[in-house]
Image (cartoon, helix red, strand yellow):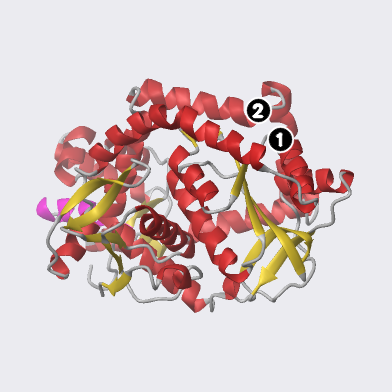
Amino acid sequence: MKEINLDKSNRAYFKENKLSYWLSLAVSLAGGQKPLARATGVEQNNIFGYVHNKTHSIRGDILFDIINFLNENRINTAELLKDVKEITDVHEPKRKTISKAREALVKKYGKNAFVYIHSISAVTLQRIYGQDYMKVLSKKGCQTLKEKYGEGAFKIITLKGFKALEKKYGKNWHAVLGKLSYEAKKKRGFAYLKKPIGIVYRKEKLTNQESKITSALKRADIAYQTHVMLRGYYECDIIIPRANKPEICLEVSNTTPQTSNLYRKISQLFVRKMLLTESKFILLIPESKDGKNQKFHARPDLVKFLLDEGIMVFWSTEIDKLVSYIKSFLDGEDCTNFLNEKYRWCNKNFDKRRKHAVSSAQKEATNILDSERAIIEKLNLRGEKKVIFNKYNWPIVLDLANDNNLYEITTALGHSALETISGKIFYLNKTLSGYKLNLILYSSKDFPTKELIENLCKIIVAS
């Protein structure tokens, strides 16, 4: 036993029929498959397969439990170990099988075998479910989950996932995963930040939304340049008319307009605004969009904030209106009617969205994450998670509030998450007066939007 060291990481392969023989003996001693399953903790279905020669191999930890059971019943298991042909890494057979399968497919369909198979699958699915087969299959999957778990299916599945991660990585699992991701990126040298500075075009494919806009600009005979880089890593989606004369900077986004995404856009816009001080900035976003299990709407207070700060906002469906605005702006015409239209939208939707936001914020304020609690205790901070209303009378949840000191806590290490928290800090600074803002980071690091907020708040490093 000591020489072999059986555990979950390995698998034992037996001589022909020998695994069945030894499992049948164990079943006989226990008085049946069910009693053996109870005695060893091995699944009864697995025992059935072993007894009836469904397989000639067994996972190391399961064999270890069977051997212990046989030893307790005074069976000499030295003979059993002699019947083991080899013990391999538990993943080795899978790797060999996958490798052989890949070779066979490439031999049959050529080097683009997997692209070909995928295309065949897509054609088959289209024939069965129609052109929108992905949506149809998604709805079927959602319905199946609801039938199995009830209306709260997605919440139940999410909690199951959280529990599994907590079991594997501990209570601060999200911090651990963030750190692992950070270390992996650090190992690669953060190559994704070291982009060359672009003067005109970057050789990068346009998104569908960018293609629609550039086509409309061409039709209107408006000069533009796409994917212009500033300082090597700040990218402007569309510059009008050209990079060395940036009168308009257009940020195009088709992401779900939920709060986190809008905060991120705020940080991205204003850090570019610091560099292109004379340019007019425009944000094109969806007014609303379906998420996985709910519909998200653009927050009226954030849209109003952007308008107040001189950034024009258009919806993804308003490309013709956007081009009309750009022409008017470039021709020096009065664009007040465009601005007033968006302010009217904010006022129209404010009360309805605010009512929902208040109830959500009050609920969120009662939920303190374990990672937040751990950092608060480590830094010996005092206060409570609190809802504060800003100058727009919109409810904002602060991770910790103590008199006029407000704290935002993040264990995130990825740039996207840190851009989001930067956007929130910038927004809070502009819309809350009389408070001191503090940002607590899990560890010290630089990120693209740090320069936007480093003078607006005190940055505290927890580790």
Judge whether 294 appears above or below 195 on screen: above
| Secondary element type, mark 1 | helix
Residue 219 in the figure: left or right of residue 240: right
Q: Does the CB distance between marks 2 and 1 fall below 8 Å?
A: yes
Alpha-carbon span between mark 2 and mark 1: 9 Å
Closer to the chain start, of discs 2 and 1, is 1
User: Disc 1 marks which amino acid?
Assistant: Ala
**Is 335 inside the magenta-drawn segment?**
no
Query: Which x, y percent locates residue 348?
Result: 48, 27
* Magenta residues (range): 60-73
Q: Pick whichever, 278 or 48, lies toward us.
A: 278
Q: Position of residue 126 (x, y in %)?
A: 72, 27
Amino acid beneath label 2: Tyr
Question: Image quadrant of residue 336?
Answer: top right
The residue shown at (59%, 37%) is 340
Residue 122, numbered label: 1
* Residue found at x 80% / y 53%: 110
Q: Label 2: which residue? A: 133
The 10 Å Cα crowd at callout 2, few under 14, some 14 to 19, many 20 or more, is some
